[in-house]
Structure formats: C-alpha cells, structure tokens
Image (cartoon, rainbow, N blue to C red):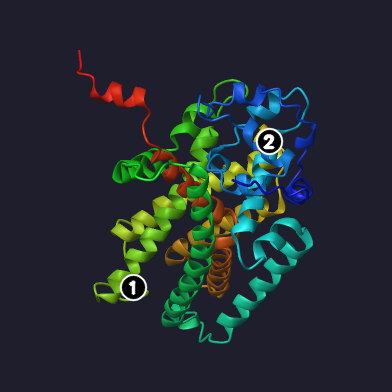
C-alpha cells in the first residue's frame, strides 16, 4: 500500500495556529503524560509524526485527532516547548477546512481580516433582509411578530436548516469515509452499534466523562462548577436545550396547540426548558470568555479569531434571548424590537456558519467518539466478559 507524502503539510498547518511541532524530537513525553494514551494509541506522539513526515491522509483519517480534550498537560511538560496541545487544536481547524468542499472554512480559519469582514457583512445582509419585510412596532403592547412576521422566520429557518444540513453532510461524509478507512478494521468485524451510542453520546458528549475525569489538572482542585468540563458542558447543554425548546414550540404551533407569540407563564414546559437552557448557555459562555481573557489555563493561552467569534456569537445569542424573555415584564419600548432583530441576526450567523466553525468541531468529535466506541473488543476483554462472576 502506497503512502502519499505532502511536503507542504507542516507549512499549511502553521496557517491554522501557532504550530511548533518541528521542534519535537519524538521523546514520547506527551504520550506518557496523556490520559487518553493507551497500549493501542500512541497519542499524541503519533499525530506529531504525521505532521513532521507530511502524512496528510493519515492525519485527516485519524480518529485520535478529535479525541483530544486539550487539557494542556502535554504542552506544559514538553521539554522542547513544541506545544503539542496547540498543534492538535490547529490540526483540527485544518481538518475542518479540508473536509469543507466550499473553501469557506479555510478562509475563516486562516485570515482574521476576512473572518471579521465576513461576519460584519453577513450580519448586515441578515439584518437588511429581515428589515425589508418588517412591519409595525406597536408601543402600547410589544408585539415582536408584528415587526418581523413569524411566518417569515419559520420559512427562513427551514430554508437555512436545509442549507446547513447539506453543507454539514458534505463535510461529515468526507470525514467518515476518511476515518473509517483509517480504522483498519478487517471485513466481517462485528460491532455493538447500539452500545456505542451510549458510550459516545451519553457518557462522552453529554456526560463529559473523560473531560470531567482527566482534564482539570493545573493548580489546586477547583469546585465542580468552576471546572472546564462544566463550563463546556453548560454551553453544550444550553444550546441543545434551546434548540429542543424552539423545535417543540414550533411543533406545538403546527398542531394548533399554541398560537405564535402567545404569552405563556414561566412554568410552561417549553418556556421553562428554554429558560433553564439559557442559564446554562450564559454561564458556560461567560465562564469560558473570562478564562480566555485571563489565560488562566494552558488551553486558553492561545485563542484564534474563530474561537472568539464563535464564543461571542453564542454569548450574544444567550444575552439577547434573555432580554426578550424579560420584555413581557418590562414597560413597552421600541428598543425591544431592535433587540429582537439583533437576536435574529446573531442566531442566523451562528446557524449559517455551523458547518464551518466550532459547531463542525463538535459534530466531527461526536462522530469520532462514536467510531471509537465501536472499537471491537480485544481477546482479553472478550475473555473477561465471558468469565463467570465470583
């Protein structure tokens, strides 16, 4: 089997972050310290070698690329200051761009000027679009959907969803095809497809298992609510909760169980779910925002423009959403309508950029975790599971 070598791989990777992996002399210290490293996974040492040797296909087909939680221990203990943790983060950005057939992810990750300009232009376009269909702004009682029609929001939401799904599928198919090839499992291997769902999505994605157990390593032990796993989990749980609440609310409207814009009490199921999810989202984004500003952890010392853009949009979505929640309890004011427009713009940007941003990272990581959970058991594991209990 031939191996394709890309002599420009390391140069390309440097466009996606502060990559210094050429300083690595393959001592294996990062593998020894990494909690994810096992007898089967020479991690992250193997990933370092892929970059040094120009093994582009090996890098892009590696599930280990997405398993890293960036705890920072490998960077902290590296004797050559090669910063393998930052290299792994840069390699993931490179992979997202490589899986994206449009080339937009590459521009967003490698050009700060383009990223900022694109975000501003996209915000203006979304805002102008909604304003072109805007209606009245009653001042006696705030009616947001008389300003921006709910039907328009639903239609645009469905259209944007289709575009996002198509763009995301293109990247996901590319990633899955490469990763399955890289797994190297022999034909006829039997997998526990259902059990892998719980291991990957229940324990790791939602439960943050490895992140929770292995990644809060620097300094004294912190309260659970200030640890990285809880901040990242809060952001994830918050976004998923808001998505589910929005989808359920829309379904209730479709079956005429609730009219659009109808006032409901705080304890109404979808509103309560959205409120709790919004609290998680704001807590998670605010905590990560502060930690990145303070650079109080190795993994937060080097933040890219993509990190800040995604985090800012998520935070703004939470803030504007909560202000809209409070509108029912505040005196009528014209500012409410512009907050509503800002919320639509921010959410629109988040969704449209999903296949090219940190959202893509979350999707690819989930897929990699699932494929890893499908790993066939070793002979020792099979023997242990077959052995009778004492």
State the image coordinates of residue 192 (x, y, percent, origin top left): 31, 41
Q: Is residue 384 left or right of residue 3?
A: left
Visible in this render: residue 138? no
Instruction: Assess disc 2: are there few (<14), some (14-19) or many (≥20) residues with their C-alpha within 10 Å of its C-alpha.
Output: many
Identify the residue at horizontal 76%, vertical 32% (top origin): 82
Identify the residue at horizontal 51%, vertical 63% (top origin): 168
State the image coordinates of residue 357 (x, y, percent, origin top left): 60, 57
The residue that label 1 is drawn on is 262
Q: Is residue 327 left or right of residue 251?
A: right
The residue that label 2 is drawn on is 48
- The picture quadrant where one finds residue 292 is top right
Furthest residue to the front? 1
Is the N terminus in the top left, top right, bottom left or bottom right quadrant?
Answer: top right
Nearest the viewer among 272 and 5 is: 5
Instruction: Assess disc 1: are there few (<14), some (14-19) or many (≥20) residues with their C-alpha within 10 Å of its C-alpha.
Output: few
Nearest the viewer among 193 and 135 is: 193
Tell which circle, 2 or 1, labels the residue nearer the N-terminal end: 2
Q: Which mark is residue 4?
A: none
The answer to whether residue 241 is above or below residue 182 is: below
State the image coordinates of residue 149 (x, y, percent, origin top left): 45, 82
Identify the residue at horizontal 50%, vertical 55% (top origin): 177
Alpha carbons under labels 2 and 1: distance apart:
56 Å
- The picture quadrant where one finds residue 287 is top right
| Helix, strand or loop for disc 1 | loop
Identify the residue at horizontal 32%, vertical 64% (top origin): 248
């Amino acid at each position: 089997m031939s191996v394709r070598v890309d002599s420009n791989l390391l140069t390309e990777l440097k466009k996606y972050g502060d990559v210094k992996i050429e300083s690595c002399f393959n001592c294996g210290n990062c593998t020894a310290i990494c909690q994810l490293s096992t007898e089967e996974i020479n991690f992250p040492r193997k990933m370092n070698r892929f970059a040094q040797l120009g093994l582009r296909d090996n890098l892009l087909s590696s599930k280990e690329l997405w398993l890293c939680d960036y705890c920072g221990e490998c960077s902290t203990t590296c004797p050559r200051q090669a910063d393998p943790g930052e290299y792994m983060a840069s390699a993931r950005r490179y992979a997202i761009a490589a899986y994206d057939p449009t080339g937009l992810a590459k521009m967003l990750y490698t050009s700060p000027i383009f990223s900022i300009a694109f975000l501003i232009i996209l915000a203006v376009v979304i805002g102008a679009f909604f304003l072109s269909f805007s209606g009245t702004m009653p001042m006696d009682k705030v009616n947001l959907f008389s300003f921006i029609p709910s039907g328009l929001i639903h239609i645009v939401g469905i259209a944007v969803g289709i575009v996002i799904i198509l763009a995301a599928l293109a990247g996901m198919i590319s990633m899955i095809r490469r990763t399955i090839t890289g797994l190297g499992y022999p034909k006829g291997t039997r997998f526990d497809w259902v059990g892998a769902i719980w291991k990957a999505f229940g324990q790791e994605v939602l439960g943050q298992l490895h992140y929770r157990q292995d990644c809060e390593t620097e300094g004294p032990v912190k309260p659970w609510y200030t640890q990285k796993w809880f901040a990242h989990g809060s952001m994830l749980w918050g976004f998923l909760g808001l998505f589910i609440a929005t989808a359920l609310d829309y379904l209730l409207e479709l079956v005429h169980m609730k009219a659009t814009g109808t006032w409901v009490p705080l304890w109404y199921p979808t509103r309560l779910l959205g409120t709790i999810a919004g609290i998680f989202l704001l807590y998670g984004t605010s905590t990560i925002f502060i930690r990145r500003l303070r650079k109080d952890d190795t993994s937060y010392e080097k933040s890219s423009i993509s990190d800040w853009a995604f985090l800012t949009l998520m935070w703004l979505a939470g803030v504007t959403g909560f202000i809209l929640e409070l509108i029912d309890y505040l005196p009528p004011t014209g500012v409410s309508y512009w907050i509503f427009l800002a919320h639509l713009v921010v959410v629109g940007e988040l969704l449209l950029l999903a296949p090219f941003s940190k959202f893509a990272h979350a999707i690819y990581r989930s897929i990699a975790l699932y494929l890893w959970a499908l790993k066939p058991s070793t002979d020792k594991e099979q023997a242990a599971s077959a052995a009778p209990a004492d």
